[in-house]
Amino acid sequence: MAIIKCSECDKDVSTEAVACPHCGAKQSKAAGSNGWVTALSVVAFLVVGIFIIGVIAGPKTTVDLAHDVTEDCIKHQGNGDWVGSMGSLETFCKIKGDLAGIKEACKINPAGC
């Protein structure tokens, strides 16, 4: 049991009271312990939702990252870095992607680098 303020007369009322003993106003069922249940339900729903989104989106593997960097590099013509380098754009971008994958793998497991 807790004490809350009446929504009508602003006097103290028990959360177990059906009506305010001072003014007779009916008390909302959302007040008191049911409010906590509602709040906890919302928090639980949000946590589960974020978890599901994380599982669906999932973290990228270093191989996926390397592939994405390579594709982006080719799409954007080496992002200006390829000019003046030796070799083809595809080779340059493949190396750039591989290095990005290795760099990410080293962040995950520094002992392996």
Image (cartoon, grey):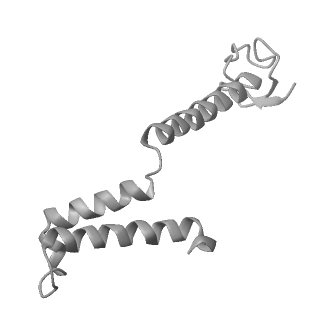
Q: Quadrant of the N terminus?
A: top right
Residue 49 higher or lower than 73, as above or below: above
Q: Does 75 appear above or below 29?
A: below
Which image quadrant is residue 79 in?
A: bottom left
Q: Is residue 54 left or right of residue 28?
A: left
Q: Nearer the viewer, residue 56 or 45?
A: 56
Most extreme residue toward the bottom, as rendered? 84
Image-based side of 97 in relation to 29, left or right: left
Closer to us: 80 or 61: 61
**Residue at x-position 59% and y-position 37%:** 47
Left or right of 22: which side holds 35? left
Q: Residue at x 43, y 52 (%)?
A: 60
Nearest the viewer among 25 and 84 is 84
Residue lying at 39% horizontally and 56% vertically, measured from the top left:
63
Which image quadrant is residue 12 in? top right
Residue 93 pos. (x, y %): 22, 70
Q: Position of residue 52 (x, y in %)?
A: 51, 34
Q: Is residue 47 left or right of residue 20?
A: left
Toward the right, the furthest residue is 1
User: Looking at the picture, does residue 89 appear above or below residue 53?
Assistant: below
Kindly identify the residue that appears in the image at 35 percent across and 68 percent down: 98
Which percent across, then down, holds residue 26? 69, 13
The image shows a total of numbered marks equal to: 0
Give x and y (percent) for residue 76: 14, 67
Q: Quadrant of the C terminus?
A: bottom right
Q: As rendered, which of 40 and 59 lies closer to the eye?
A: 59
